Each structure stands twice: as C-alpha cells, then as structure tokens.
Amino acid sequence: MENSKEITIKTHKEAKDFSILLVSTAQVLVQNGAEIYRVEDTIARMCGVYKEIKNINIYATYNMVMVSFNYEDEDIITMRRINSYSFDLSKISRINDFSRKFVKGEYGICEGAQIVKDIGYSNYQSLKNYLIFGSLGAAALIFNFGGNWEDFIVTLFAGFAGILVLFKVAEISFSFFFNNIAGAFAAALVAVLGISLGIGTNVDIVITGAIIPLLPGIYFTNSVRDFMSGDVLSGMYGIMQSILVAAGMALGVSLVLYFYY
C-alpha cells in the first residue's frame, strides 16, 4: 500500500494514470447497474483527493463515460465506451468500499487501478447462481398470480431455460434485442410443452412467471431515478432500452403462442 500521507500528484504521467483509474471505476459502476448520479458523485469525490487537479468534469451515460480535468495547465481527457453489462450489484458494493478508502488516502493510484481491474474482471456471481435463484424466484412468484404447485414445477424449468438461453445467446449475439427474443422464446416454449404434457394448468400464469427474470428492472428503475435527478439523456436511453427489451420478450413469447393456439 502506498503511503496515505503522500496524497499528491507529482507528474503528468500520474495525472494521466489517475484519469484512467477514474474512467475504469466509472465503467465498472455503469456496467453493473449503478445510477448515473451515483457514478458521477463517486468520481467527483475521488477527484477531491488531489488538490493539484482543477476544472473537473465528469460525464456518464449508459454507453459512455468521460472524465476531464486540468493539471498544471494541461487538459487531460479520458473517455471509454461501454458495450457490455453484467448487473452484478456486489461489484458496485466493492467499488463503493474501494472509493471510500481511496478518498481516505488508504490507496494510491497504482494500487487503486489494480483493485478496480480485479473487481471489474472477476465473476462474483456465476451462471449457476443466476440459473438456480432466478428460476426459483420466477417459480415462487406464480403463486401471486393464482398458480399451483404443478404450475410451479413448469415455471421452474421454463425460467431455467429462459435464463440459460439468454446468457448463451449473449455470448455470440451482437444485440441485446435478439438475446431477449431468444430467452423469452425458450421460456415460453418450455412452458407450453409442460402444459401440453399435462403438468401445469395455466399457460398464461406459467409464461408470466418464467419471463420475470428477463425483465429490465434495474434499467427501468435507474432511468426513472436519472430523470428525477436531472439526467434526461441517461433517463431516455435507459427507458428506450427497457422498451426494446420488453418488445423483444413480447416477440419471443408471441412466436410460441402463435403456433400453440
């Protein structure tokens, strides 16, 4: 650990390394479901550690983060485009913990960069966890819609299939829209097969429960909060993406129901 008493930037290289650290931190937060105002506030607090940097500007949306500041009459600007998302809230928690310690001077720039890199590239939530808890959560919700234990069993497998296909297609697909079409199609297909085999009783309830894990809840909620905090562009982006995700899910389910009925 670097000496916490030496909270200063001595060279232009350190200033550029610091800008990269800031953008990397913002990227991990955005990729894992943090609100835009939280991202910008975290970066602003980290910038406050070093008194040598002036004219700090932070701009973040759901597909780009950019940080600029002035160090010894030189403007340093770093931007990074965001193309993928994982929505792992444990990473947000770890970044928040890191940023608090960084502000206190417990970490330096080099050490901080390595910590952020480790957090960003690590997999705290495995696909197995998503499959198990996602499908169980989906199946449990059908009781709120009037389902029974037979519907629970079908929804369990349908939710499992939807999540699995969503993740597997995402590995080879270039568009989140097609990922959600495939995931909803798989969930609805398993649901219809289960009902056709006489296991479940209500196909509508089963499909509704099975696709719930695919809903863009984090995106939509964050978008509303962004609107309320004045980040109109980020709010519009999130809401439009939520609408497209929902449209993709509706299309996937409709394809199955078209042939079922």
Image (cartoon, rainbow, N blue to C red):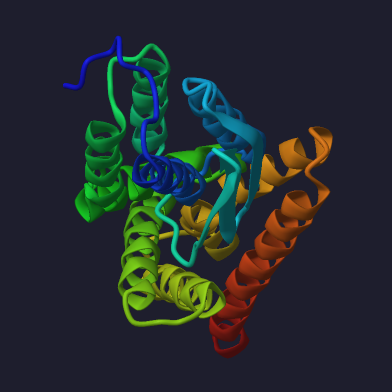
- Given residues 50 and 198, the one toward you in this image is 50
Above or below, comparing residue 247 to residue 96 in the picture: below
Q: Position of residue 45 (x, y in %)?
A: 54, 23
| Quadrant containing the C terminus in the rendered view | bottom right
Q: Quadrant of the N terminus?
A: top left
**100, 104: nearer the viewer:** 104
**Measuring 33% from the left and 52% from the top, which residue is drawn there?**
153
The answer to whether any part of residue 59 appears in the image is yes
Q: Residue furthest left?
A: 1
Q: On screen, 66 above or below 53? A: below
**Residue 117 against residue 108 in the figure, above or below:** below
Q: Position of residue 71 (x, y in %)?
A: 54, 39
Q: Is residue 2 left or right of residue 59?
A: left
Q: Residue furthest front?
A: 73
Q: Is residue 47 above or below residue 139?
A: above
- Where residue 215 appears, as percent x and y from the top left, is 56, 55
The answer to which quarter of the image holds residue 218 is top right
| Residue 205 in sight | no
Residue placed furthest toward the bottom? 259
Q: Residue at x 48, y 23 (%)?
A: 50
Judge left or right: residue 20 versus residue 33. left
The residue shown at (38%, 31%) is 95
The residue nearer to you, when weighing 72 against 24, is 72
Q: Position of residue 54 (x, y in %)?
A: 62, 32
Query: How many discs appear?
Result: 0
Residue 110 picture quarter: top left
Residue found 50% across the figure and 40% down from its top = 141
167 lies left or right of 200 = left
In the depicted view, which residue is nearer to us: 149 or 12?
Answer: 12
